[in-house]
Every structure is written in C-alpha cells, then in structure tokens.
Amino acid sequence: MRYAVAACQTDFACPTHHREIGSRVDRMLSMIDGAVMGYKPFFPVRLVVFPEFAHAAPIYPTASQLRDRLAVPLPNEHIERYIAKAREHGIYIQTGSFIESDPAWPGVLFNTSCLVGPEGLLSKYRKVNPWIPWEVHASPHDIPDYSEEMFPVVSTPIGRLGCAICYDWIFPEAIRQLALNGAEILIRVSAYMDPWGATPPMDWWTVVNRCRALENMAYVVAANQGASLQHYGPFSWPGGSMVVDFDGRILAQADPGPGKKIVVAEIDLDALRTARQQRLGHNPLAHLRWKAYPPGQKGYPPATFASSRDPRGDRTVSENEAVIRSAIRNNHAL
C-alpha cells in the first residue's frame, strides 16, 4: 500500500458566472493527466487533490448574487467529467470546491468539495466552518434538521479518505471528528491567503497541517490556492501545497508564492496502520479521554441561517457580523 498523492494548486482568473466553470475544469483535467503520466516512471499517483475556489469563489457580497451567478447543483456535468478521468487513470480525485445549490435545501448555498473515483461520486463535503463574516454561504450546522453526515469518511482501495475545507482546519474538533470517523488520509481543500500562509512569522498553513497530522496519526494532503492578487483579489494566495506524514513530517511542499504547481509525495499506508495498531506512546487516538470533553455549549449558535429574514432570501456579511458579536458576548458572560 505505497502510492503517491498529488496536491495541485491553481492560479486561474476567478469566474464571474457558472458558464465559465467548464473552462477551469478543462485545465484541471489537464493537470491530472500531467500528474499521473508525468510521475508514472517513479511511482503511481492514485490520489489528486485541488484547492478551494478552484471552480468558483464567493466573490459576491450576498447569497442571492452567488445563487444567481455561480451556484451549481452537485452532481453535474463537471463531476461526470472528473469521474470519467478517474476511470481513465484508476485514481481518486478530490475536486476543488463549488458553490453548491441543493433542491433539498431551497435557497441555501454550500461551499462543497466532491470525492470521485472509478466508482463514481463517493462523497460531498460541505464546509462546516465558513470564513465568516466574509463567506455568506451556509454551514450544515446552520440548517435546522440537517440530517446528513457533516464529516463523511469514505473507504476506498487506497485507504479511508476524509476531507475538510480551509478554515475548518483551524478547529481541531472538526479534523478530530474525521479521524474518529475512521479517516487515514486527511484532505485539505484550501484557499488560505497571506499573511497566514506558508512563511514565518505567520505560517499558520504549515503549522496547522503538521499539527493536525500528528495529533490524529494521519497523512495530510493539502492543496492551497496559488492565485495571484490580480486573479482572486483582494487577497494574494501563497500556495505552499504540501503532503505531511502521520508524525508531522513534511514529505513535500511547493515553494511559497502564487502559480500553478503540482506537489507529489509517496505515502505508506501500511506504515500508518502499523503505527496506529502497535504504538503505546504518542498514540493520541488510543489515548483520547473522550468523556473528559463534554459537548461544547458556547460559540456560534446552531440554525443561524433560519434566523435571517427569510431562509430562502439573502444572507449578508452584516448578518454574519451580528451573530459573531452575539457569540462573543455569550462567551464573555461566562
């Protein structure tokens, strides 16, 4: 069970309409061909990961504008193309994120990444922790009676794969839940901007990826947005896509800075499984005293999407700011 993974960072101009998404998919499919065929003489690439916002970014200030101009249902014709490519090469692909609309939740938008393989669409991960106040799409946590698994993990021939998106990784609870659901390969689909990128003194990107790997005894495959300021303003995106082993060692990392890049590293799934089964020390999953940590009662309240004027209407930055201020007051009152 040794194979290679590829973290592919993109530097595309941001789409302004969903009609433009197909051209981005063209370029990502080409990157997949390059990663699989280019590295074939050295090791088999079996997993390819793309960054957040590779298909579309939340560039509009209200949910209604995003819904009208960039939102798409999932699955769609783009997912079918990824599935065809996965079958062609016998690989698994974690897509960049889409702005998703789902008829099951009328009017609600999600930031969603899909895992596809030769078998088809295997899972959809919807960002649980949007980067508020600026991201105005919803979290599954916001939706009353949301019944789907928030942290899905998929068992595949290359291991058990779980994904979380960008800001989710600042919450240890989110990534720990993926590990407790069985994830061996933790996938980060990210658009982490400067100054919180891959270089000191604010290299949150690198620090967090390494920490989540070692505290969950899991490999991390992290693809970060590498877009230049002119493509995805008002931020610049430092790239630094990387692969980390289950002891927190960086196996490969792109040089910081914008640009399309492919980072490839070999992982040893048998070594991970042996470590999880045999280590008596530094085995956080075995040592977890889970009853010592009762469910949290503080922070961002649930079902906040429904608290806006109309669940099918606009969600705005100002509404996000009001909810955050309420959460701050609640924490300070304790």
Image: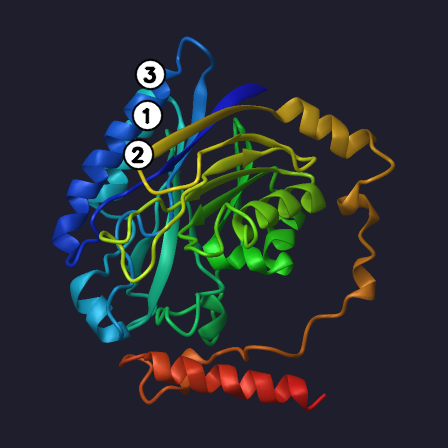
Name the residue at 52% across, 26% down. Answer: 157
**Which of the two residues, 12 or 18, is positioned nearer the viewer here?**
12
Q: Are marks 1 and 2 in contact (CB under 8 Å)?
A: yes
Q: Which residue position is annotated with label 1?
A: 87
Q: Is residue 101 left or right of residue 210?
A: left
Please tell me whether mark 1 or mark 3 is closer to you in this view.
Answer: 3
Q: Which residue position is annotated with label 2?
A: 83
Assign a secondary structure to mark 3.
helix
Crowding near the residue tagged with mark 2, few <14, some 14–19, many ≥20 C-alpha atoms within 10 Å: many
Name the residue at 31% across, 86% down. Answer: 310
Crowding near the residue tagged with mark 1, few <14, some 14–19, many ≥20 C-alpha atoms within 10 Å: some
- Residue sitting at the far right: 280
Q: As shown in the figure, which amino acid type bears the numbered disc 2?
A: Ile
Name the residue at 37% across, 29% down. Answer: 118
- Residue sitting at the far left: 19
Q: As shown in the figure, which amino acid type bears the numbered disc 3?
A: Met
Q: Earlier in the sequence, mark 1 or mark 3?
A: 3
Q: As shown in the figure, which amino acid type bears the numbered disc 1?
A: Arg
Assign a secondary structure to mark 1.
helix
Where is residue 57 drawn, in percent x and y? 28, 58
Please give the label number shown on residue 37: 3
In the rendered image, is residue 240 in sight? yes
Where is residue 147 drawn, in percent x and y? 49, 65
Task: State how far apart marks 3 and 2 are (Cα).
Answer: 17 Å
Please tell me whether mark 3 or mark 2 is closer to you in this view.
Answer: 3
| Count of numbered tags | 3
- Name the image quarter holding residue 299: bottom right
